[in-house]
Amino acid sequence: MDQAITFQPAAAPSPIVGHRVELQLLTTLKCNLKCSYCSLGVGEVLGSQTELRYGIDQLGRFADTHLRGKEVVVTFYGGEPTLNRPMMGAVMQRFAHWRYQLQTNGTLLDDLPAEVLSRLSNVLVSIDGGEAITDGYRGRGVYRQVLKNLRAVRGAIGGSVTARVTWGNPATSFDEIDALVADDSPFDYLYWQFVADEQYGGDSCERRRAVLVQLVERFFERSDRLYPLIPLMGIVRNKLLPGRAQELTAGRTQCRVSTHLLNVMPDGNIYPCPDMMYVPAMRMGSIQGNWLKPSPLQQTPAMPCSGCEAYAWCRGNCMKNLYLGYVKNDLRYRAHVVEPICELLRFIGREVDRHDPRAWFAALPLPLRRQITDCEVYEYVEVMP
Ligand code: SF4
Ligand code: SF4
């Protein structure tokens, strides 16, 4: 008997690379602080959108169309995301099976309901180092207020708490960073990123290198406990197990912008990098329009990574910096920001090598090895500084 053969059109390949996706939902572009280096100040993004222009049903339709079958992590982002608590609660309720993270300045954490706190897998709290430097950038009293809030709510937070340090000031000392992961600190981990600003003149790189030497020294000092600095943990992991640097991001940048990071502006437009939401060429989708295309922020031959000694474990650190320095050919930015940061990164790599990371790893108890290889926080931050 003849049987009718019907052909199904092949499903279009997903614009998202891999099985995971991070939806960075900017709940508002309002902020209650005025940090002097805020990256959203570039292109006058900060404060430009205070109302959400899409509804939860439109987000649901977008998720059904583009995120089906993916493991979804939401990061509530801003502005200061806790200024729009109703949106956080509504999203958590509607998409109860997703994972949640909060990126916050920490000043309003104690206003969040216990139900919301308990559902957070990680809280990233922005801080700039010690009290004087943090208050200098963020306003008087902010450092103490953030630590007080964190101590008050720490027991109610379901997951980890990570200090997110923008290392802007060359005066930042080893002691300031060390204090943020001390035994009495409310932070479980610390992630730092070198500031994307012209802060690398004079002796400032030398001063940073002196602190880095101490941090790496302290990291390898003990094998019975972990010094929980994510960039050092990640670099050691990547050096020992280079495949791990590639697993979640298909060998592209570990900050996820080339594969599976979707920054959703309050107006519903989608961009890969939260620092480039003012560049029209970076727009890659829309919630209301229900469309998504692959990230436009990718490695190009103009970038120097393939010939760099760090590439196997760095994978192209910050694509925004590389794009501005080598695609837009901003020679000033390249010389004063991108190259000094890359040089610092290569320096860390050499410092790590000096401490025989393989032998250190071999001596670790299994739970600590697992922290190095599988720490969940790698999924929430850029890993490289
Ligand atoms: S250090 Fe710089 S040039 Fe080298 S791989 Fe990383 S981003 Fe690329
Ligand atoms: S590290 Fe990634 S997400 Fe962060 S600014 Fe650079 S490109 Fe954007």
Image (cartoon, helix red, strand yellow):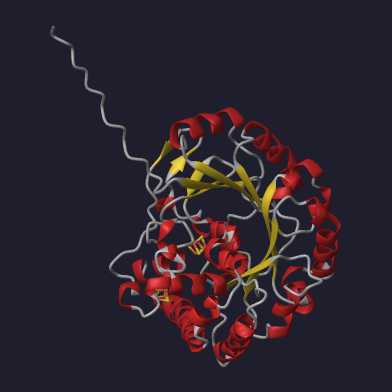
Residue at 65% x, 45% y is 27
Q: Quadrant of residue 321?
A: bottom left
Q: Going by the image, does 203 lie left or right of 19?
A: right
The location of residue 309, given as percent across then percent down, is 36, 80
Screen quadrant of the C terminus: bottom right
The location of residue 23, given as percent across then percent down, is 54, 46
* Residue 113 appears in the figure: no
The location of residue 342, given as percent across then percent down, is 45, 78
* Residue 207 appears in the figure: yes
Q: Is residue 93 above or below residue 107?
A: above
Screen quadrant of the N terminus: top left
Q: Quadrant of residue 171?
A: bottom right
Instruction: Locate ligand 1 by image quadrant.
Output: bottom left
Q: Going by the image, does 206 lie left or right of 1?
A: right
Q: Is residue 314 above or below residue 122?
A: below
The answer to which of 138 and 65 lies nearer the viewer is: 65
Residue at 46% x, 67% y is 318
Q: Going by the image, does 359 lie left or right of 36?
A: left
The answer to which of 72 and 66 lies nearer the viewer is: 72
The location of residue 345, given as percent across then percent down, is 48, 79
Residue at 48% x, 30% y is 64
Residue at 62% x, 55% y is 46
Q: Going by the image, does 3 lie left or right of 14?
A: left
